[in-house]
Image (spheres, helix red, strand yellow):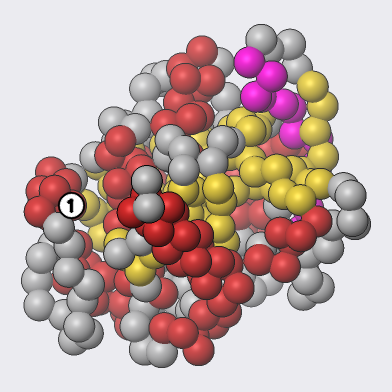
Amino acid sequence: MVSSTIVRKGIIPAAGLGTRVRAIAGDLPKELLTVAAKPLIVHAIEGLAASGIRQIGVVISPAKESIRQFLLGEPTEFLAPQLDAHLRVLLRACKFSFFIQPSPLGVADAVSLCRDFIDDEPFALVMPDNILLDGLPVVSQMIPFFSREPRDMLGALRLEAEQASRFGNVGILETEAVSDESKKIVSVRRFSDKNSTPLHIPAGESALKNFGGSIFLPHFFDYIEKLRPHIEGELDDVPVVQAIIKEKGLLAVALEGSGFDVGNSAGYWAANLHTERKQLLLQNL
């Protein structure tokens, strides 16, 4: 039984090491890198707020106290990005809860710290290094479908072959069609593992990839604890999602917009180039 079809709370995991963009970020937490003059974590918060979600749990590591300071408007050890007035107002309007993940033990472990905060409600899980431009926020595109059919669901982006090098290789979806007039929602049959090989899409083909965010029912936490004894090392969200697919089924919503995995250097530079080109086009109108 789903306790609510209203998504009121969100989780942003921000405790990762950020090794793929360390050459760009240096000691700065990657979540404070900017795209379109906004830190990545502000993109995530802005998207949640636009979706009606202002109770936000942020998971940080002990080394990322500057993220908490930045979001609360406190001085940080880094030269924090300057925000315009409406974004400062937005941050003040959100209610943040911060959770410390002592060691980088994976996304699912990070999410597990937020169980009491979520309090048996559905929740949005948003990855701050996935940026969707030129469209509604990821969660905003998903909520109408969740309200109609409250099930676990993923955001999904259609990638062409030439985009593959800018994205991580995890979360490639195998899907089946469902009866839906919008033709934007599919049933997920397989969610690919994370591995060390680059994402490859053959020329002329495309792939549907989990991207940006998800909406999960509170049983997500039960699956985490069910799997924890059987996982050595990092407890990532991948096996949790795979278990839900196997036992409950899971939906994916095809997203509209330009997506960028800015957790790797190629995606980060591509996102900034995209915004610069867009600004030039607007200036020349």
Q: Which residue is mark 1?
A: 87
User: In this view of the protein, which residue sits in the foreground, 88 or 239?
Assistant: 88
Residue 243 relative to residue 92: left or right: right
Amino acid at the residue labelled 1:
Leu
Give me the residue at 56% from left, 58% from top.
260
Q: Is residue 190 magenta?
A: yes
Q: Looking at this view, is 138 or 227 the one in front?
A: 138
Where does the magenta region start and end? 182-193
What percent of the width, then of the height, locates residue 171? 71, 52
Residue at point 56%, 51% (across, down): 259
- Residue 16 visible in rendering: yes
The number of callouts visible is: 1
Q: Quadrant of residue 275?
A: bottom left
**Mark 1 nearby-residue class (10 Å; few <14, some 14–19, many ≥20):** some
Name the spot of residue 81 as percent of width and height, x first: 22, 72
The reply, left or right, for residue 253 in relation to residue 130 is right
Query: Which is nearer the eye, 282 or 188?
Result: 282
* Left or right placement of residue 6 versus residue 153 in this view: left
Q: Residue at x 50, y 89 (%)?
A: 23
